[in-house]
Image (tube, coloured by chain):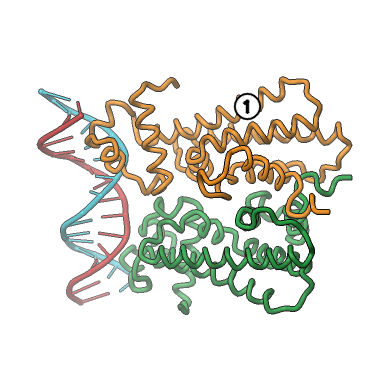
Chain colours: A green, B orange, C red, D cyan
Amino acid sequence: MELKEKQKKILDVAVELFKEKGYMGSSVRDLATKLNIKAASLYAHIRSKEEILEWICFGIAHEFFAQLQEIKNTNLPPKEKLNLFIDKHLSVVLNNRDVTHIYSNEWKHLDGRLPEFVEMRKNYQLEVEQLLLEIYKAENWELKSPTFTTRFILHTLNNSYFWFKRNTESSVDIKEEIRDKILFGLLGNQK
Amino acid sequence: MELKEKQKKILDVAVELFKEKGYMGSSVRDLATKLNIKAASLYAHIRSKEEILEWICFGIAHEFFAQLQEIKNTNLPPKEKLNLFIDKHLSVVLNNRDVTHIYSNEWKHLDGRLPEFVEMRKNYQLEVEQLLLEIYKAENWELKSPTFTTRFILHTLNNSYFWFKRNTESSVDIKEEIRDKILFGLLGNQK
DNA sequence: CCTACCGATCGGTAGG
DNA sequence: CCTACCGATCGGTAGG
């Protein structure tokens, strides 16, 4: 799924558009106008509107997977694996805020490749759950509801781009604050 | 904004539909079919498709406000105010999962009453922030980023319906687990 | 509640 | 990359 230069340009503009109006609220004519071409001309570069959504959803899913695999392949102490996972996942999210938003909210419109997407995401969730189980076991922590906890952490990470205004705080500070909230909550680090 | 019986029925069916296909992905014909009437007949009960979205978004927003006002009017100790706020807000969310989902994800399509909605939500956010400030001050806790923290708590509460499968766990257990995660995070309550 | 219908817009194709 | 155009569907109205 290698994209040509023009396709990358279309992807970038589509991300901006879908973020603003939603996938179903964005027409191919809107997209073409933003690219200063006619709607019909788009089809020299894309097979369908849905294909663009596929690029977005599967592209970022692939990044999440790659990042997780890297962590699984290290021999870090469990606690640091957890920290690194949060850090890496957050980096992907914060470097791709609009894409993550579309991935989280528009995947249901994938249609043809929807089953493939749903399974891919389920697998990712299961792998994260395994990582958590491994960490909790090694640290002798209690993990009451692994599935619940996994969903909590992934959802919180994926929606964290929402908690601050863009460009007002440095990325390092943001990541620290988010990790802090996920690990210790509102009160866990209060004396 | 008192709804008649038929309008309530339309609202209920629309919530189900919008949750499944999204607001822009749902046509008035889809909605009419689900109600076993013709699309044109809907307009005896609604002014527009958008009006239904207004019922959904402003209706639940009103519930959030009412619940917050109740808490502000009590004389509970600060710490219990925080617990009660989480509990009450969660009750509204869990009793209105699909509505909360639409409120969170489809508000941008409100159009005519969009500015009113955005301001309403900003005010709610500010009131919650004030409540947090009051609580943190009384308890002598440190609150580094009030706005960030407020967004964290509201987003986490509003998305919590996502963390578990429907009807698999009792509502009491769910609320406890969610409050636990928000207050203490993944590790805050581990010894 | 229905039938009949409106103009506008949708994603996409043909052919150059 | 364009013009020209397709059938389907959109939200909504008129009139009963």
In terms of secondary structure, where does tag 1 sit?
helix
Is residue A10 in view?
Answer: no
Q: Is residue A24 above or below residue D3?
A: above
Question: x, y (%) of residue B47?
Answer: 33, 29
Q: Quadrant of the N terminus of chain A?
A: bottom left
Expressed as whole percent of the image width and height from the top left, the position of residue D13 reads 23, 30
Residue A91 is drawn in which quadrant?
bottom right
The residue at the point 48 percent across, 70 percent down is: A9
- Residue depicted at 84% across the width and 54% down the height: B191
> Local crowd at mark 1 within 10 Å, few (<14), some, or many (≥20)?
some
Q: Three-letter amino acid code at disc 1?
A: Gln
A34 vs B61, left or right, is left
Rendered location of residue B127, percent (x, y): 69, 31
Please determine whether, in this image, residue A120 is positioned above or below residue B75.
Answer: below
Determine which quarter of the picture holds residue B125.
Answer: top right
Observer able to see residue B133 = yes
Residue occupying image coordinates x 77% and y 54%: B187
Residue A44 position within the rendered picture, expressed as x and y whole percent measured from the top left: 34, 73
- Image quadrant holding the C terminus of chain A, namely top right
Q: Is residue A169 above or below residue A71?
A: above
Q: Which residue is mark 1?
A: B67
